[in-house]
Image (cartoon, grey):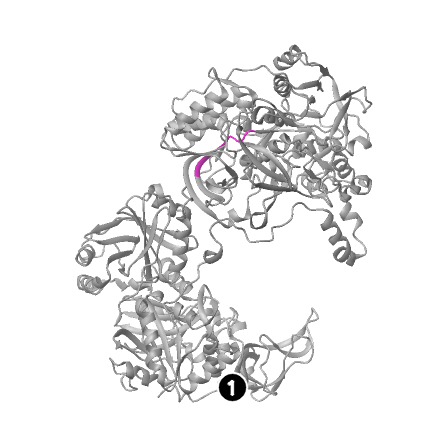
């Protein structure tokens, strides 16, 4: 079997900040209500992360868990760690109502890195970037849905795989030198 | 003649010369000039021709209210029409051309209209060109369009780029004059986020030109120290060159930032559209001076008094050697003083008021300038430039008492607060009788989401014209905005300006008051649309009483300046003609944008490759590399067909279909919707969503299902597979995936919230490849990894395993009638798996086929397509799909809808096949005719075509369609309409299943 290929095969652009597609990245959609017995333990076992509070994202050892909605979480982990994490979730949540699905290949992931990385998002998302803080912000970039969070000298952006080229175009355009806000 | 003065000019850098051209003529200006000041410095007082009468026009104003001086700016891909020279910053290499004339600005044949003014009154077009009817379209309109109109549209794609930025603040301050800065100092001290936007490149507004003294300093110095203080506040953002264009509901504000208008081609975006959410808005947008209505007030050399002193003080430009100032207020005396101090001659100040005793007039008298009271200008002399004025009694009928030679006229009819931002969302206005102006009524503000005031007018925009009043008013407005946000006003004292005692203004709407028709037909109200006092009075005589109707009849205020100079004067003339009070007549509606916004800025980044999101499958690049002709399916890009060298699309489709029937076709089906539904109540849920039963589907099996909306109409279809005891995977149409997922969540969240069901849209997680044709199984066997035999994976079942090393889920389903496998593989392996199919399939005759081939294959089998056979009015029973609608289930979405009499009727149009008697392809959308015609005279119809193709398998046209009682009419011959209206095709009614009706080929 060939190696998994990210939507844009790791495209990059350099503007007043650096934009690069990373991945493939492992992602699991987990649907369960916060009070579900064993949920926090299962998430911990699968990702090492604490269950996040509403709108927040938690990180542990390179893995993350984001709050997506009142009954949905997103686990972010290495691509090849998905099977083990799915097994941990299934083990921990067996017999309780939940849904866990591998969505690693349904997504494209970008990094925006540099001092003014926030400016790229300010041009594309109606989110109030001054208040993003430690949140996983579900919003839009231009005309498509996207989510992002801050950290490690920039932002990580997630969108659907099919529109990766469009989002790369948006990010590149918005980071063109001379267009600093 | 206007000219550059030897000294002065607070905004220009004389050492930095700038070259530019006007109508091809090379001129020189200074850095810091506007195009207006540079043109005047070069003696160019004639800058354009008027819209209707082609009168010579000059520069009237110094800001965004300029009605006359519009030019075409730039060339080729950077050409933009209708640019105001007064707001255009000069740069090296600027090219500009005047508008509205032929053959030249100096000699314009259209000026004959000026002589014909008697025949071109208000409403002229409506009255004159009514008959004969066809003449409007073919004769009058083309001629009028050529002689009227402003700039020309650009002919090349825009060379520049644009972008949006989303802003968020607690207090947005529109305007960076002294009121705006004062408001910012107060709001900034609260610690809340404050955004201050100023449309010009300079802060401080008019105060430095008007010579205001604030906190004992010159206005310039005070502005500098205020900016310094604001720069030190981390919570305050200042942006110049950014015009607030509109205020919308809930504190939404649009603003246009001019980034590189004055530095074209420097690599920066030209403009940026700010989309702002503001808690509260302080409108410190200043005021605009009003012109006076006297005959010849449009001759080049007649200028607003405030604009004239702007040119003198800011740009060291003299508008003329010898100026007459005409006014009804004290403020205009500042212009006389500025001119005199610059060493120019002020021939006289003509003041409409009988008594003039204010501080400023006294200073003017003391400077030795002649002041005439109770007088007005009865006529301006000159054609392309001012040569003098005739003056007379302001209360008279226009008899000239004296002529005064001059080459410039400064006029002031008082000031109108810029109430636009206050009014955009419904803020109401009060008529201030004393100052003769509309000002915001703070008791009737525009409201925001919590029902409190959204906009707080400050300074001159609130009618506080004098510096001292403006500063305290602005501090108070900012405090009120903070209070509305739940903050106590910080203890920031308003700055104190030295007050100048000014006398009252005398409203003068027509000068002189008793002027006759000859004079009134040369008194301009709206310069840009050529509307005069006589036009508005005519409208009143013809019965127009509403200001909104009068506006549209006369076109007053309807030009690109949106009546910034004309509205109040026009409305006052109308109320005079109607004998009504000004507030009783009211104003027209203020609407965004404040000044025109470039279309490119509104489009933002959405151009070229990122005009709209195009969804691409993992195999997209392969399709392009094979020369696929792509078509949009929703936002997806899908191959329509893969034409080979020399092939037409039709030939390519036929080849692809035949190859699939005879050997092996491979289809990129990745766009199919795939929704995972899981939970203890998932079976019950799907039984409600689908018309047939899904809860009974055994694990490992596939079942075709239909979804209807509550009304019973067919909404989506697809194959459902049972993955585990409590999970199903629902395939939807390509276009329906997001909609159906939303539909599921809607029912789960809003109606059946206590059912234990979760859904996840996995559409993009998997690439899906249909391997279709007699050789399909051979290809999969060649890949190896799992048993794909008929026994291991019978028709309508699926299995998981590996093929060629790829993790796959293999479905035995067929949308073509052939032996067919649909194989789902993780998207990041999609391209590699697809290539493997083609590599290993090469000697089995593998060829890709596109969406058109897919359509032909399914139509040959009589399979329906959502969106072709359905259009929102079709129920499953119409398509003979009764077998997929459960009779046993107590309920499902659409069941009760389908029981309504019209839908349950036996008399409906139902699906059949059609074979044209001559074997041709029946035109898509053609109707089956019925005898007679309906009440509108249209031919009656009894059916229509829903799908029609050439079948390369059957070598003739095939069609599906709906026909009244169709299935009972097999063998009957019906007639179709034709696009030309002539005789259409005759066709035989047949079964819609044209190929392999027993289904033997797919079940092998």
Q: Nearer the viewer, residue B827 or A74?
A: B827
Total residue callouts: 1
Q: Is residue B717 above or below residue B786?
A: above
Q: Residue drawn 61% across and 39% down? A: B21
Q: Is residue A127 in sight in this rendering?
A: no
- Residue at the top extreme, as displayed: B366
Q: Is residue B35 in sight in this rendering?
A: yes
Q: Nearer the viewer, residue B227 or B956?
A: B227
Q: Position of residue B12 (x, y in %)?
A: 54, 28
Q: Is residue B409 left or right of residue B834?
A: right
Q: Is residue B285 above or below residue A95?
A: above
Q: Which residues are magenta?
A: B278-286
Specify the quadrant of the image occupied by residue B388: top right
Q: Which residue is mark 1?
A: B991
Name the chief secondary structure element in magenta.
strand
Q: Is residue A144 above or below residue B333?
A: below
Q: Position of residue B412 (x, y in %)?
A: 66, 25
């Amino acid at each position: 079997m060939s190696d998994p290929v990210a939507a844009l095969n790791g495209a990059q652009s350099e503007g007043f900040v650096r934009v690069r597609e990373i991945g493939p990245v492992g992602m699991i959609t987990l649907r369960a209500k916060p009070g579900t017995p064993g949920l926090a333990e299962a998430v911990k076992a699968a990702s090492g992360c604490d269950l996040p509070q509403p709108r927040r994202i938690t990180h542990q050892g390179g893995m993350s868990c984001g709050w997506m909605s009142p009954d949905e979480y997103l686990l972010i982990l290495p691509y090849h760690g998905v099977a083990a994490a799915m097994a941990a979730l299934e083990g921990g949540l067996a017999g309780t109502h939940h849904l866990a699905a591998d969505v690693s290949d349904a997504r494209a992931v970008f990094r925006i890195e540099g001092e003014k990385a926030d400016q790229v998002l300010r041009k594309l998302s109606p989110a109030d970037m001054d208040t993003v803080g430690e949140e996983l912000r579900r919003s839009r970039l231009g005309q498509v849905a996207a989510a992002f969070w801050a950290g490690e000298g920039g932002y990580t952006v997630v969108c659907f795989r099919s529109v990766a080229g469009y989002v790369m175009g948006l990010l590149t355009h918005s980071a063109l030198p001379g267009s600093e806000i | 003649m206007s000219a550059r003065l030897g000294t002065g000019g607070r905004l220009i850098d004389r050492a930095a010369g700038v070259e530019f051209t006007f109508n091809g003529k090379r001129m020189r200006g200074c850095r810091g000039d506007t195009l207006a000041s540079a043109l005047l410095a070069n003696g160019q007082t004639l800058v354009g021709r008027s819209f209707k009468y082609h009168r010579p026009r000059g520069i009237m104003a110094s800001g965004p209210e300029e009605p006359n001086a519009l030019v075409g700016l730039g060339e080729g891909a950077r050409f933009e029409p209708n640019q105001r020279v007064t707001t255009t910053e000069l740069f090296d290499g600027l090219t500009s051309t005047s508008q509205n004339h032929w053959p030249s600005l100096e000699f314009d044949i259209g000026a004959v209209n000026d002589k014909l003014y008697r025949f071109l009154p208000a409403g002229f077009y409506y009255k004159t060109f009514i008959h004969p009817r066809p003449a409007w379209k073919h004769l009058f309109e083309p001629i009028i369009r050529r002689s009227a109109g402003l700039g020309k549209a650009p002919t090349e794609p825009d060379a520049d780029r644009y972008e949006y930025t989303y802003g968020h603040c607690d207090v947005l301050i529109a305007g960076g004059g002294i009121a705006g800065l004062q408001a910012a100092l107060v709001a900034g001290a609260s610690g809340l986020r404050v955004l201050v936007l100023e449309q010009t490149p300079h802060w401080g507004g008019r105060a430095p030109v008007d010579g205001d003294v604030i906190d004992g300093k010159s206005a310039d110095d005070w502005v500098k120290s205020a900016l310094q203080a604001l720069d030190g506040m981390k919570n305050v953002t200042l942006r110049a060159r950014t015009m607030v264009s509109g205020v919308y509901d809930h504190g939404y504000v649009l603003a246009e930032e001019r980034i590189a208008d004055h530095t074209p081609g420097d690599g920066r975006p030209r403009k940026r559209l700010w989309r702002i959410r503001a808690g509260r808005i302080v409108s410190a947008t200043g005021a605009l001076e009003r012109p006076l209505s006297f005959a010849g007030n449009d001759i080049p050399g007649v200028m607003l008094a405030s604009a004239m002193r702007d040119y003198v003080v800011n740009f060291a430009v003299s508008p003329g050697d010898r100026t007459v100032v005409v006014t009804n207020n004290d403020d205009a005396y500042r212009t006389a003083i500025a001119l005199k101090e610059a060493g120019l001659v002020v021939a006289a100040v003509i003041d409409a008021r009988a008594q003039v005793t204010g501080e400023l007039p006294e200073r003017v008298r003391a400077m030795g300038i002649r002041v005439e009271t109770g007088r007005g200008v009865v006529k301006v002399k000159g054609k392309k430039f001012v040569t003098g004025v005739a003056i007379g009694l302001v209360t008279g009928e226009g008899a000239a008492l004296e002529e005064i030679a001059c080459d410039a006229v400064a006029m002031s009819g008082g000031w109108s607060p810029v109430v636009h931002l206050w009014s955009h969302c419904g803020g109401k206005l009060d008529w201030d009788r004393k100052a003769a102006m509309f000002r915001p009524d703070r008791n009737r503000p525009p409201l925001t989401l919590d029902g409190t005031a959204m906009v707080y007018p400050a300074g001159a925009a609130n009618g506080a014209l004098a510096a001292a009043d403006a500063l305290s008013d602005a501090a108070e407005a900012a405090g009120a905005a903070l209070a509305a946000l739940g903050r106590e006003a910080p203890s920031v004292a308003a700055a104190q300006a030295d007050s100048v005692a000014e006398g009252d203004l005398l409203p003068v709407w027509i000068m002189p008051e008793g002027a006759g028709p000859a004079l009134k037909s040369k008194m301009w109200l709206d310069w840009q649309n050529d509307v005069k006092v006589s036009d508005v009075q005519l409208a009143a005589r013809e019965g127009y009483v509403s200001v909104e109707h009068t506006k549209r009849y006369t076109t007053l205020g309807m030009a690109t300046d949106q009546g910034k100079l004309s509205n109040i004067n026009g409305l006052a003339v109308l109320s005079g003609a109607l004998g009504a009070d000004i507030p009783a007549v009211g104003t027209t509606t203020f609407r965004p944008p404040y000044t025109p916004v470039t279309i490119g800025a509104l489009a933002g980044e959405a151009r070229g490759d990122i005009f709209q999101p195009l969804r691409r499958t993992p195999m997209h690049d392969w399709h392009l590399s094979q020369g696929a002709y792509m078509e949009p399916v929703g936002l997806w890009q899908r191959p329509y067909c893969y034409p080979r060298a020399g092939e037409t699309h039709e030939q390519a489709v036929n080849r692809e279909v035949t190859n699939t029937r005879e050997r092996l076709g491979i289809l990129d089906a990745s766009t199919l919707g795939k929704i995972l539904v899981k939970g203890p109540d998932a079976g019950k849920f799907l039984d409600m969503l689908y018309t047939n039963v899904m809860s009974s589907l055994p694990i490992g099996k596939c079942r075709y299902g239909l979804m209807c909306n509550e009304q019973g109409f067919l909404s989506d279809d697809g194959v459902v597979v049972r993955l585990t005891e409590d999970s199903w995977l629902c395939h939807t149409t390509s276009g329906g995936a997001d909609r159906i997922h939303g539909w599921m969540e809607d029912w789960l969240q809003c109606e059946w919230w206590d059912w234990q069901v979760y859904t996840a849209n996995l559409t993009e997680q998997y690439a899906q490849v249909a391997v279709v044709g007699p050789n399909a199984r051979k290809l999969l066997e060649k890949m190896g990894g799992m048993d794909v035999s008929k026994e291991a994976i019978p028709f309508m079942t699926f299995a998981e395993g590996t093929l060629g090393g790829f993790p796959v889920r293999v479905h035995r389903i067929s949308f073509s009638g052939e032996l067919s496998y649909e194989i789902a593989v993780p998207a990041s392996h999609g391209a590699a798996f697809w290539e493997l199919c083609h590599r290993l399939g090469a000697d089995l005759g593998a060829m890709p086929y596109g969406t058109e081939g897919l359509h032909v294959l399914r139509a040959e089998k009589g399979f329906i397509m959502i969106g072709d056979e359905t259009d929102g009015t079709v129920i499953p029973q119409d398509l003979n799909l009764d077998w997929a609608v459960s009779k046993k289930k107590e309920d499902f979405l659409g069941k009760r809808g389908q029981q309504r009499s019209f839908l349950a009727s036996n008399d409906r149009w139902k699906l059949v096949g059609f074979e044209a008697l001559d074997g041709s392809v029946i035109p898509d959308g053609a109707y089956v005719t019925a005898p007679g015609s309906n009440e509108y005279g249209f031919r009656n119809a009894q059916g229509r075509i829903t799908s029609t193709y050439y079948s390369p398998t059957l070598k003739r046209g095939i069609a599906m369609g709906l026909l009244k009682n169709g299935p009972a009419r097999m063998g009957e011959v019906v007639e179709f309409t034709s696009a030309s209206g002539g005789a259409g095709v005759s066709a035989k009614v047949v079964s819609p299943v044209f190929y392999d009706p027993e289904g033997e080929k797919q079940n092998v």
